[in-house]
Image: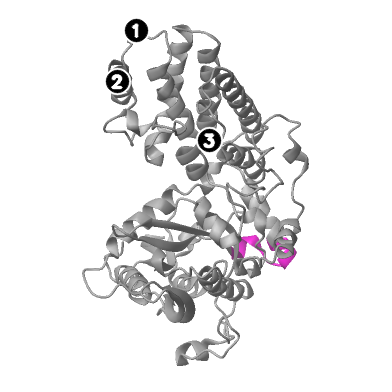
Amino acid sequence: MAKLLRGCGLPELFWHNIPIWDPAESTKVVTALPFLLPHEVLATLFPKCPKEHLSKFYMDPAAGDHYTNVAQEVCSKLGLSLERTVIIGLHGDGVPYTKHSSLEMMSWNCLADPSGDRVPFTGLSKEFVCQCGCQGNTWDAILEVFAWSMKALTIGKYPVCDPLGMPLQEPQRRAQGNTPLGLQGLLLQCRGDWPFLKVLFNVPGWNNTEICWKCRANQETYHIAHSLAPWRAQRYAPGEFMSHLRHQGIQPSPLFRSPGFDLDMVVLDWLHVMDLGVSQDCLGNLFNDVLSLPGLPFTGKKQRLEWLWERIQAFYARAKPPSVLNHLTEEMFRQPNKKPKLKAKGGETRYLVPFAFELSRDLAANPGGPHWEAVLALFDRLHEIMLLMGENNYDCMKVEGLSKEFCIIYTGLETACANQGRAKCWAIKPKLHMMQELLEFTATRLGNPKLFWCYKDESFCGWWAKASKRRGGANTATATAERFLTRYRALNNSSAGL
């Protein structure tokens, strides 16, 4: 989308009062925060968009893929035509901004072009997010603005009132009120890491009795992986989780006021569930086993670690993956009194899975034994799932079966290690349940997880966090967001673009 936005003259920032936290006074205050409104960005872009580029915005009803079918279903319910409706996905995440703070960023993209560029909505330093116990007051107000923009986009007309129902103040926006945008659109996806989803949607945390917003898995049942697991028969019906929140005195996010948007469209993400979760647990346990278990040619931890690193380097030289570790230390995958887990970036983890499959295959042959055979079976399933994600015709049913097998093997490893007095080794964590939700339910409905993972979003957030750093002056909530959005507008409104 960057080339299409280049020089198109992005709209002026929209300012709206938002409750934030004043860290200096330790109290909640109200301040005006700037936004780049999706309906205005698209309305500005479309009159200048060449017809040959419209495929970047509109899904093809004849495509027949999972997400297109879901979008077609929602459009039909709302009386919209899919081939003339822009389907949007929203992403939110926090990225390091300074040594002591992170920048919470929200952006969106057109789902017809999953790998296309992201467009920012707003940004806010985490220190300014409300901390008074009001259950996300700052985020609720921000999402109220986004939902308001989505309503305008769905109707296809510029709004006549602001998000609070008051008359618009700016003369230009007031004059545009109720005039056609020239297009229509829907929000049908929301992506992010677990902390972001938890704050925005009040989904359960890992330490809650219930840990999932899609089913009633709890601390006692989430680790059960087989076909008769209780949570499989305890799926939330449409609207049931919302009722569950209201019963607890929690109001659902204002984002659900966006036409057509529901909880099923809050998607789990491969990057956070697997490459920064389950896969890192598997790799950490594998490397820990290499250093700990008998039967390998070396007895000392230092020698085994050097042997492991040499094996990794040889794999890198042969496979030439785009993301690699530049060193390996014991502290990167095991620490005292903690469960093994590899500390690495998502891409570094993902490209180590084929290596882990090769290594576990060698270890299953020599020294061999039931444990290494189980480890090989585990990485065999994980490796095959990743290979299937790279195919054009994603086989959701095959992946669903592989996921079940993977999780059953993992639970077997946990039990065996516990019986051997290695309680922290191959221990199941809640993200194993999230893996099953992603691969056995979400991907079955929406298709290949590669189409809605957050790698592109993370790159966008990281780039803009660096580009919008302040060079002095007060670090206010308004200044941070305005600097970020103003620089984005300036780059796109110039002939150079991004």
Mark 3: amino acid = Met
10 Å crowding of disc 1: few (<14), some (14-19), many (20+): few
Q: Position of residue 462 (x, y in %)?
A: 35, 55
The residue at 58%/89% (across/down) is: 166
Q: Nearer the viewer, residue 462 or 138?
A: 138
Q: Position of residue 337 (x, y in %)?
A: 44, 33
Rendered position, 374 above or below 280: above
Q: Position of residue 192 (x, y in %)?
A: 51, 54
Give the foreground label among 1 and 3: 1
Which residue has dot 3 on it?
Answer: 389
The residue at 56%/40% (across/down) is: 431
Left-right relation of 91 to 302: right
Count of numbered badges drawn on the protein: 3
Which residue has dot 2 on it?
Answer: 314
Give the mark nearest the N terminus, 1 or 2: 1
Callout 3: helix, strand or loop? helix
| The residue positioned farthest toward the left in the image shown | 471
Rendered position, 291 above or below 259: above
Which residue has dot 1 on it?
Answer: 297
Callout 1: helix, strand or loop? loop
Q: Position of residue 479 (x, y in %)?
A: 33, 75
Task: Point out the stretch of residues depicted in magenta.
Answer: 75-85
Choose top left, top right, bottom left or bottom right for residue 358.
top left
Rendered position, 118 above or below 235: below
